[in-house]
Amino acid sequence: MDGLLSGGNMNVVERSGDTVLRQAGPWTPTVHRYLDYLSLAGIDWAPRPLGIEGERERLSFIEGDVPLYPLPEWVWSDSLLTECAGRLRELHDASIGFGLDDAVWQSLSKVPAEVICHNDFSPHNLAFSDGHFVGAIDFDMCSPGPRLWDIAYLATRIVPLTASTPDGAPSMQEARRRVGIILEAYGSDASWDDVLRVAIIRLVDLAQMSIEKADELSKPHLRDEAAYYESEARYLREVRRAG
């Protein structure tokens, strides 16, 4: 089935048969090289790069259900926390050894540069079948960074760590336990406080990027999203202070 795909906020995504066309940028050759590297490392659930055609890139299509907001209730299961965290660990481990010489990234690199972060590893960029993880998409924002950068953002979206509980989602009373499931499944020795600290920074970073993109792409609604992210960061600061 051909046509525009739903959910793109920063990029127009078009399906063409069993491939996907997206807007390319200076970072695209690096991302394609990285996706090829992941394939060599055994990751068979990420898109395969198929070339750059003028101003657009072509990638293989990942078959599966990519949930849109408001997220369906099945996304909030404990078992999916375990699956997603485990796959994130696989992705990070597979990135070790990737050559950074002459690399160009759309997102800024972060310290410590332990792995290549996806930078948006969350349900809206993951594909599922019958409630189980089958793949990840939208690697165009990836860049070097600490493992916790991706872990904390996954937690904000799938725990979720949010002031207002989405319909059908677990409340913040469940958050510490659910973050613990993510950390255990990933194999991280990070703490609840570590996750909150980085989640706050991640939300502020996302707000700043949204403001920049609002001007660059002439999408004023991104300023409203930036205000939301800043509000959520303030809320998580209160949660962190409460211990």
Image (tube, grey):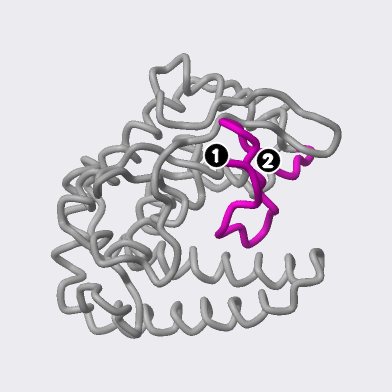
The reply to whether discs 2 and 1 touch (Cβ–Cβ < 8 Å) is: yes
Which picture quadrant has residue 138? top right
Residue drawn where x is 65% and y is 36% of the image: 16
Give neighbour class at mark 2: few <14, some 14-19, many 20+ (Cα, 10 Å).
Answer: some
Query: Magenta segment: does it hold 17?
Result: yes
Q: From the viewer's perspective, is 33 left or right of 98?
A: right
Place of residue 115 in the rendered image (x, y in percent of width and height, measured from the top left)? 46, 35
**Mark 2 to mark 1: distance in Å?**
9 Å
Give the quadrant of the C terminus. Answer: bottom left
Return the residue nearer the eye: 61 or 57. 61
| Whether residue 45 is situated above or below residue 158 in the rendered picture | above
Q: Which residue is at a point 74% across and 71% down the rendered structure image?
A: 214
Q: Which residue in the structure is indicated by mark 1? A: 144
**Which numbered circle lies on residue 105?**
2
Is 49 magenta? The answer is no
Q: Is residue 216 above or below residue 241?
A: above
Looking at the rendered structure, the secondary structure element under dot 1 is strand
Kind of residue sitting beneath label 1? Pro
* Mark 1 Cα-neighbour bin, 10 Å: few <14, some 14–19, many ≥20: many
Residue 177 horizontal/vertical position (percent): 13, 64
Q: Which residues are magenta?
A: 1-26
Q: Position of residue 50 (x, y in %)?
A: 66, 23
